[in-house]
Image (cartoon, helix red, strand yellow):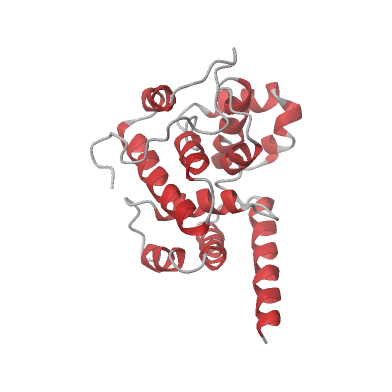
């Protein structure tokens, strides 16, 4: 776990899909410094832990660990910005944002980070951008990278909610089953707290449940 506010141990040579807007390569350490400066010590430590979990999941399930590391590094990069600023980012980039401004405010940081990554930070890899965008809500038709970042955020080392041990165990056995259970828990927690649930999350749950049932049917 990252307890010192410094990321370790994964350092890609050059994360896929990240360049300066001028076209010059952006070193991973520079992206890391940018994120570290933008976040509180606690949030940056969480980011480091998510990155570590995402890389392990990528290696376990045959995804690109460099892309996973990059997506994890940037996933919460704007989370601590004021809501008014996030709303301005969404409204100022309406074509990219789509209807994200209509989502509950607690999930805005995902689409906003993806927008900033694309328009300001030189990230042009759709797989990375989508994983960042949907890391809080999920969506129907989640890609493997979507699932990796969503789950890594849920099971990062500092998490200590009662169900996290179950999710960590599932994560080592079956990515789809672990993500399905993680989405179920997220929706249940929000319902218990009376929070507004983004429609994307319900769509993700329905899609994951259909896929799980279809998989069971093929095994009969």
Where is the C terminus found, in terms of image quarters?
Answer: bottom right
Q: How many marks?
A: 0
Q: Against 171, is 65 above or below?
A: above
Q: Nearer the viewer, residue 75 or 26?
A: 26
Q: Nearer the viewer, residue 174 or 75?
A: 174
Question: At 55% across and 17% down in the image, what residue appears?
Answer: 20
Q: What is the residue that sits farthest to the bottom in this orientation? A: 220
Image spot of residue 187 (x, y percent): 56, 60
Q: Nearer the viewer, residue 134 or 189?
A: 134
Which quadrant of the view contains residue 161? bottom left
Question: At 55% across and 56% down in the image, what residue appears?
Answer: 194
Q: What is the residue that sits farthest to the top in this orientation? A: 22
Image spot of residue 26 (x, y percent): 49, 21
Image spot of residue 16 (x, y percent): 54, 33
Image spot of residue 18 (x, y percent): 55, 27
Which quadrant of the view contains residue 95? top right
Question: At 69% across and 64% down in the image, what residue appears?
Answer: 206
Specify whether 110 is left or right of 103: left
Q: Against 185, is 135 above or below?
A: above
Q: What is the residue that sits farthest to the front in this orientation? A: 13
Question: At 36% across and 35% down in the image, what residue appears?
Answer: 44
Specify whether 19 is left or right of 92: left
């Amino acid at each position: 776990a990252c307890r010192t506010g410094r990321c370790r141990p994964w350092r890609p040579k050059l994360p896929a899909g990240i360049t300066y807007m001028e076209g010059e390569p952006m070193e991973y350490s520079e992206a890391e410094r940018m994120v570290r400066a933008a976040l509180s010590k606690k949030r940056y430590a969480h980011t480091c832990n998510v990155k570590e979990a995402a890389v392990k999941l990528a290696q376990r399930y045959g995804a690109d660990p460099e892309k996973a590391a990059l997506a994890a590094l940037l996933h919460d990069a704007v989370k601590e910005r004021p809501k008014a600023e996030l709303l301005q980012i969404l409204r100022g980039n309406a074509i990219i944002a789509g209807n994200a401004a209509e989502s509950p405010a607690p999930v805005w940081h995902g689409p906003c980070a993806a927008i900033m990554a694309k328009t300001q930070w030189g990230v042009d890899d759709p797989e990375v951008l989508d994983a960042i965008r949907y890391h809080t809500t999920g969506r129907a038709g989640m890609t493997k990278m979507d699932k990796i970042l969503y789950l890594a955020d849920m099971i990062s080392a500092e998490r200590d909610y009662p169900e996290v041990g179950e999710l960590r165990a599932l994560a080592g056995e079956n990515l789809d089953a672990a993500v399905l259970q993680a989405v179920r828990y997220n929706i249940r927690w929000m319902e218990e707290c009376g929070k507004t649930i983004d429609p994307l999350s319900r769509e993700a749950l329905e899609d994951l449940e259909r896929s799980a049932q279809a998989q069971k049917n093929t095994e009969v």
